Image (cartoon, rainbow, N blue to C red):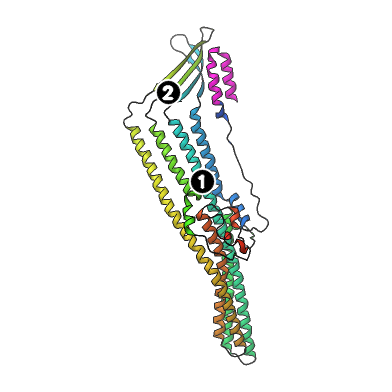
Amino acid sequence: MLVCLRVHALLDAMSYRNLFAVPFLALALPAFAAPSTGDRECPYPSAPLDVTGVVAQALCRNPDTRTAWLTVQAQEARLKSAKSAYYPTLDLSASQTHSFGDGASSDRTGASLSAGWLLYDFGGRAADKRQAQQVLEAVKAGQENTTQKVMQAAVDAYYVWNAADESLTAARASEEAAKETLRATETRQRVGAGTLADVLQARTALSQATLSVIQRDGTREIARGTVAQALGLPAPSTVTLAAPPANLPTDLQPPAFDGLAAALPDRRPDLRAQKLTVEAAKASYDSIDAQDRPSISLAAADGLSRNKPGADDFTEAGSVALQLKIPLFAGGRYQAQEIVAQRQVDIAETEYERQKLAATSELWTAWQGVRTTAATVDASHDLVASASEAHRAALARYRAGLGSLIDVLNAQSTLADARQQEAAARFNWHRARVLLIKSSGVLNTADLLVSTDATQSGTGTTGNAP
């Protein structure tokens, strides 16, 4: 505002010929627009968080999403800077000079207003603007890719914690089974049908089961710290999580791989970001290519000066010029810069091809992960069922005096392992499913929830994947 007032004051002091500055000033006014700012408020979670709540907190609090947002804001400012080349420039200067020597001293006061406007440059400004626009779109795609990574990491941490919690529950169930076995051996010893060696073996098995509970509890707390980190909270923070639905869809298998792979270039934000980077490199080459071409500019200046002691009136001097600039020789600098820019285009295109291969490999790994975990879920259910029956039968035979304690302990150990595998299988499938969605395209909040309706079993596996 102060600059505008000074400009108006100077224009009032000058003659009507200075009105040439008015259109320049009007065209330059958009440059005074204030940049937009934004901020986020993330209330600390009080209620237990399900998977969607975990993701919402992660997107709000995680420093990576904040950095990506700030990067977009910075590139938007760079695009605005590139667009400013289409506007004229307007400069105000003033001076106060005191001269002295052997003769009389004098003072000179001066003020000048100068303007310039690049009218035509054979596409240089357009290339700069296009390059900044392409980089902005690439940065936005990169922001989306960062969002995908934060979401996937938060979901992964959530299911790792639930798997650890389920594993702790299974370990406690195994501890209860060990206690039951110990009671059976103590009962048989009291009636004279068992030995002290059986009791000691059962106590050892119970101690091992108790140690497993302690270890599983520690693993769960470490997983809780990982969740806090994914949410952008200090590791000691107490984050309460809600368990996901126990039921899974009837069909856990992923869709066809070929369809997912074909859609990768259009769906994955990291590939779109790199493709836009290629376009930005091409625009940068066009901008450098235009440097050795002519340019046409309009320049104008007007000034006032006054000498003291001397004339009481101001002295005015002004000029208006149409300038043509034709680069003739720069020692090969432009040609060298063009070669550098062309190689940058080649590097960006090569990187795009590399990322496509990596994305296809990542998708293949994630796709196989869903297939494997889906089979593991079914197998773990059958394993727990058969191990439970074997353990009940072995314990019943031992109580009846028909079996040995070794059979009971072996069945007990097998059941404990089966419970641990079942605890991990369901959550590993959830993690693999989310990873497949992220690897095949865009992970949305709606994809975090799994439909267990038999009529929609196929949609629960890969969400928005084709």
Asked which quadrant contains residue 39, the reply is: top right
Front residue (pair 182, 382): 382
**Residue at the right extreme, as displayed:** 47
The residue lying at 36 percent from left, 39 percent from top is 340
Residue 346: x and y in percent read 37, 44
Residue 239: x and y in percent read 63, 58
The reply, left or right, for residue 13 in relation to residue 98 is right
Mark 2 or mark 1: whose residue is earlier in sequence:
1
Whether 348 is drawn above or below 289: the answer is below
Mark-to-mark CA distance, 2 and 1: 37 Å
Dominant SS of magenta comes to: helix
Residue on which disc 2 sits: 296
Residue on which disc 1 sits: 141
The residue lying at 55 percent from left, 72 percent from top is 380
Which amino acid, by three-letter code, is at mark 1? Ala
Label 1 crowd (10 A; few <14 / some 14-19 / many >=20): many
- Secondary structure at badge 1 equals helix
Which amino acid, by three-letter code, is at mark 2? Ile
Residue 38: x and y in percent read 60, 41
Front residue (pair 140, 95): 140
Front residue (pair 71, 338): 338
Verify whether residue 26 appears in magenta: yes
Magenta part of the chain = 1-28
Asked which quadrant contains residue 330, the reply is: top left
Verify whether residue 305 appears in magenta: no
- Secondary structure at badge 2 equals strand
